[in-house]
Amino acid sequence: VQLVESGGGLVQAGGSLRLSCAASGSAFRRNAMGWYRQAPGQQRELVAGITSGGGRTNYADSVKGRFTISRDNAKNTMSLQMNSLKPEDTAVYYCNADPSTGYLFPWGQGTQVTVSS
């Protein structure tokens, strides 16, 4: 599976962004997936996960109620709607398999999200 993230940008605090992840290959639709982020000097962290069929989602406490993960298996895409953005959401965002799968696909280039105060 090859992963390509897009949709990042510069936004003011309180604003919104919608990130997209485009995946190649049929393995995407068979796997639980997640959105990760990595801020400068920090480890990469999982912010949201979704089951293979899209029926269940989970979120990090820091984004719960503000971010929404979704997927379209027919189009091999996944999205992250981010509302009420905060400066601490600033990071490079990546999509990949959810940790529950026990493995990761090769990382994409990520998409930069910068939230100004």
Image: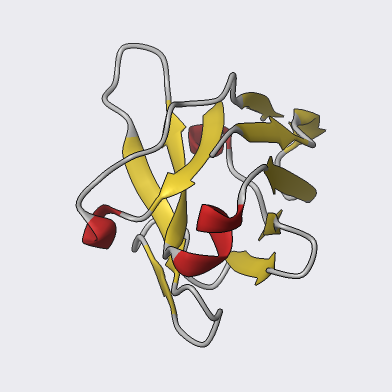
As displayed, is residue 17 above or below residue 72? above
28 left or right of 19 in image? left
* Percent of width and height locating residue 102: 20, 52
Residue farthest to the bottom, as pictured? 55
Can you give x and y, in whole percent of width and height, for residue 109 in the image? 59, 19
Drawn side of residue 61 relative to residue 4, left or right: left
Image-quadrant location for residue 13: top right
Q: What's the image's color scheme?
A: secondary structure
Question: Which residue, as the protein is rendered here, is positioned at the far top?
Answer: 41
Q: In this view of the protein, which residue sits in the foreground, 52 or 95?
A: 52
Image spot of residue 83 (x, y percent):
70, 58
Q: Quadrant of the C terminus?
A: top right
Confirm whether residue 49 shows in the render: yes
Give the vertical position of 86 relative to 93 (above or below).
below
Q: Is residue 68 left or right of residue 96?
A: right
Q: Closer to the camera, 103 or 62?
A: 103
Q: Kindly identify the residue that appears in the image at 25 percent across and 45 percent down.
A: 103
How many labels, in total? 0
Which residue is located at x 55 percent, y 33 percent? 93
- Residue farthest to the left? 102
* Front residue of 1 and 59: 1
> Which one is in front, 50 or 3?
3
Query: Does the image show residue 15?
Result: no
Which quadrant of the view contains residue 72?
Answer: bottom right
- Is 27 drawn above or below residue 88 in the view shown? below
At x 44%, y 74%, the residue is 51
Coordinates of residue 99 in the picture (x, y in percent): 26, 53
